[in-house]
Amino acid sequence: MIAVVREQKSFLISLFFIALLIRACVFFGYLSRDNRYWQVDSNTYNLVAIGISQGKGFCLPDGKPNFYRLPGYPLFLSLYYKIFGVNTKNVLWLQVILAAFIPVLIFLLSLSLFPQNLILAKIASVYSAFHIGFVLYAGFFMTETLFIFLFLLFAILFFRSFKFFERKNESVAWIPGQARDDGSCELSYNKKLNLESQFLPDPIETSQDFVWFQERMGEQYTREELREYVQDYLIETPEQKNMQRLLLAGFFLGLASLVRPVGQYVIILSCIILLFSSGRMGDRLARCYAVFLGWIVPVSFWLVRNYLLLGTIFFHTLPGGHFLYLSAARVAMYVHDCSYQEARDILQQEVNTRITEKEVRVGHGLNEIERCHEHEKLAVHYFLQRPYLTMRFWLTDIMRASLSLYSAELLYLESGRKNIDYFKKDRTIWSMFERYIFPETSSWWLKLLIIIEIFLYLFILLGFFAGFILMLSTHANTDVWCKVLPFMLLFIVISLAGGYARMRLPIEPFLIILALNFWVTYFKTCFIKKKSKHVV
């Protein structure tokens, strides 16, 4: 892949600056005006970042330790605050620059999944440079850009580190020899192999990247590039390289886990996937160990800090209030026959009563994580009271997260941040789509943008589902789908207490690549058929 990057460096540099120009124009011309970049969660991140830059640690202005938010994004902000001073608008220029690398990373991710398809990598990366979700959240005071940047680094390394399906004649045991001074190397093969063929397959030729290398043999390579291939394929075994990639992938996932509270679910899913990958059970367990070891290193300081302060291992205290007031409150509307806001007030009174009673019972005040647990217990109580209603609301949230438009943020800003009652009882599913089909705005450019986003998203969804059906019927790219689809389902499912479009933004690169892979293959096939007819 390094050789491809060197060959395509002009394209990648151009892609970066085009993405940077688009994000800079949107931020400077729109989001930076009237504090449009400021979101609901921005203030807490800002306050914690100020405390870090002033040497107070992960604390709020009152000096109390912060447990509600993860430390990754405040640390990122504090780097700017420490050097240039506190400025909530100018700090986002650092984020805009970081966001311009995302299309470049999507180019690399596409090559990791489809190493033979350079055209797909270019189209997917260019598409992502103009993607409205990536462009908008580059300029919001939110965690999305930083998390996606780190998550893509994890995905690139992780997906290159294993296969699900491998042909039997590709499993060859071999032992690398000592490298000579000139960079060459001798190989000693394991002769105790029960192979049907009388010829032992070359370990280099069995690697996935070597197919690409063979296609480019006619080109002239520099001495450094040849040494790179010798290092990759002769001196180190493929499994050794995979372990290094998994270790580094786990490290980037650990950093991402400190930015957005989903990393613990991703690492569990990653280990499950690796357990079902190809190879011996010992190799699969070693892969799990490598990615988990890489993950635990960056998150350990935060877990240890929380344990020393509160005596419990946990990441943050957000889940309690999140599930109680965003999810259980909708069930409470029907239990108490009231409005959503009235249900929230009732739940707040009930949880305060629970906390007070427990404090009297245990003889001391509850700390933050204990209060979080009381919120969670009350939420579960309401979920169990109306399980079918709960499932209906969760499925609705999953559908909203899957189908909502990113331009909804612009509708919200153009309306003067008018609150929308998402959870009123008589709200129909049609009303969710009606908001975009008949937007309540007088802005012609916003209406045009919504129409463009609708058609582009339909194009992507059609390509995604067509590619999925094609995979089921022809088993084409089964390995890629088995790697990517579990992560897509995970991020969609964990949106069950929110339902916002931004919750699917981390998996948008997967959606784009899989959908465009179908369309590239489809149009290429049509072109070949048309050309063959002309030849005949």
Image: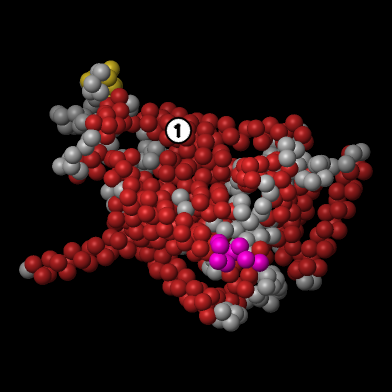
Main SS category, magenta section: helix
Quarter residue 408 falls in: bottom right
Residue toward you, 431 or 419 = 419
Residue toward you, 477 or 510 = 510
The residue at which mark 1 appears reads as 287
User: Is residue 433 visible in this depiction of the protein?
Assistant: yes
Amino acid beneath label 1: Arg
Picture layout, residue 500 above or below residue 354: below
What segment carries the magenta color? 27-34
- The residue sitting at 10% across, 70% down in the picture is 534
Picture layout, residue 139 above or below residue 414: above
Residue toward you, 464 or 142 = 142
Q: Position of residue 200 (x, y in %)?
A: 19, 29
Q: Quarter holding the C terminus?
A: bottom left
Decide whether residue 198 is among the magenta residues.
Answer: no
Q: Position of residue 381 (x, y in %)?
A: 76, 55
Q: Is label 1 in a helix, a strand or a loop?
A: helix
